[in-house]
Amino acid sequence: MRYGRTRGAGVALVLVGCGVLVVAGCSPAGNGGGAASGTPAAKAPAASPSASAPASGSAAPTPAGPPAKGSVTVAGEVAKGLESPWGVAVLPDGDLLVASRDRGTISRVETATGNTTVIGEVPGVDPGGEGGLLGLALSPSFASDRMVYAYFTTASDNRIARLRYDEQRSPGEQLGAPDTVFRGIPKGFVHNGGRIAFGPDKMLYVGTGETGDTGLAQDKKSLGGKILRMTPDGEPVHGNPEADSVVYSYGHRNVQGLAWDGDRRLWAAEFGQNTWDEVNLIEPGGNYGWPAAEGKAGKPGYKDPVAQWKTDEASPSGLAWAEGSLWMAGLKGERLWRIPLAGTAPVAEPEAFLTGKYGRLRTVVPLGGDRLLLVTSETDGRGSPEAGDDRILTLTVR
């Protein structure tokens, strides 16, 4: 069923970049320098994994959580006319960097005016199917190093590179040469994962896909169908489940959403196959079941999702945390899902908003407090683009 779509352009709002955990790092300085392959050997010390529960002598009481029913208001339209937007990073002044999956370019969006300028192209991007230029993240020490991290598909693999952003250079030439920090992630026509984010521990987390080869998800030696955790230089982190490995969790089909809640727990959204899409609470070393389990299977040895959806209601991509709830963008489902949580337990059934109004929804970015960014995905080859697509909207949520 195709829903009728109503367009409502609003006044563009000036956005604040700090506090964003899903796609941008605004925290103090992290590590720098160096490069690594898909199987690096060196280790670097780091904070405890963000997905670990806080130590306690006794179980803390379960928090009350947010209201069972929420609300979403479209407060403004920041930009329109974007082609295949995917990753977004919020700059310290509130402007946005936006990746075009199919063009392999990064553009700057001025949130005060909506003006969009290509700042440069990422060399080596090989778009096709679900591959191309995907996730973006700012270095934890962006204020000093000006590094933008990008996850992208090449002719041989998926990889992560960092590029220096120099605003003093001419538009279109403001990105420096890519410094590859991690390579060797399997690529495919589908299921390339692609979301990257710096966590509260200033480490880089990466969602990957199994490229349609289901055996990769359970193979701990493969980088496909995993969540990876690495230093900003692409090295394994001390405290990862296995020494000298960047694999943080496995048994995933296609992870495209990463978010941390107010207690630093890591959550991920991923595509199911024919039955269930999932939101999972990520634990270090956890096996999330694919392909032996899809959805809440209750099978020993596998982690069940906290929430699940029929695939035509979701096909999830971006994920964000705000106002005590997870907010998940749906592609095929063309809706924004709210998952209210008390600790790690849902307060109520997931609640859908904006169903069919803006088409396919790709990325959600928290801006602090009750504000989110929402990126549509009608020009990705699977939508029905209308005049003005694709768009970035600002939302007020509860």
Image (spheres, rainbow, N blue to C red):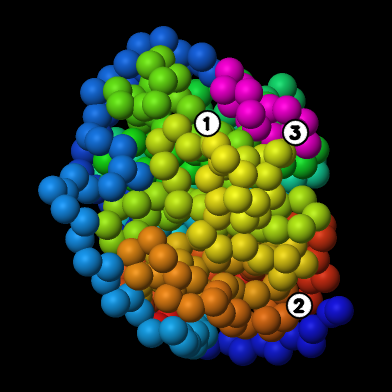
Q: Where is residue 98, by image quadrant? A: bottom right
- Distance CA(mark 2)–CA(mark 1): 33 Å
At horizontal 55% and vertical 63% (from top left) the residue drawn is 307
Question: Up-down: is 33 above or below 117?
Answer: above
Residue 305 in the image, given as x and y percentages of width and height: 55, 55
Q: Which residue is mark 2?
A: 387
Residue on which the image places disc 1:
160
Give the spatial CA distance, label 3 vs label 2.
Answer: 38 Å
Percent x, y of residue 186: 67, 27
Callout 2: SS: loop
User: What residue do we see at 68% from left, 27% from top?
Assistant: 216
Quadrant of the rendered structure where residue 188 is? top right
Q: Quadrant of the C terminus?
A: bottom left
Q: Tell me the residue that label 3 is attached to.
A: 214
Kindly identify the amino acid type of the residue bearing the numbered disc 2: Ala
Give the residue at x 40% y 36%: 284
Q: Which residues are magenta?
A: 210-224
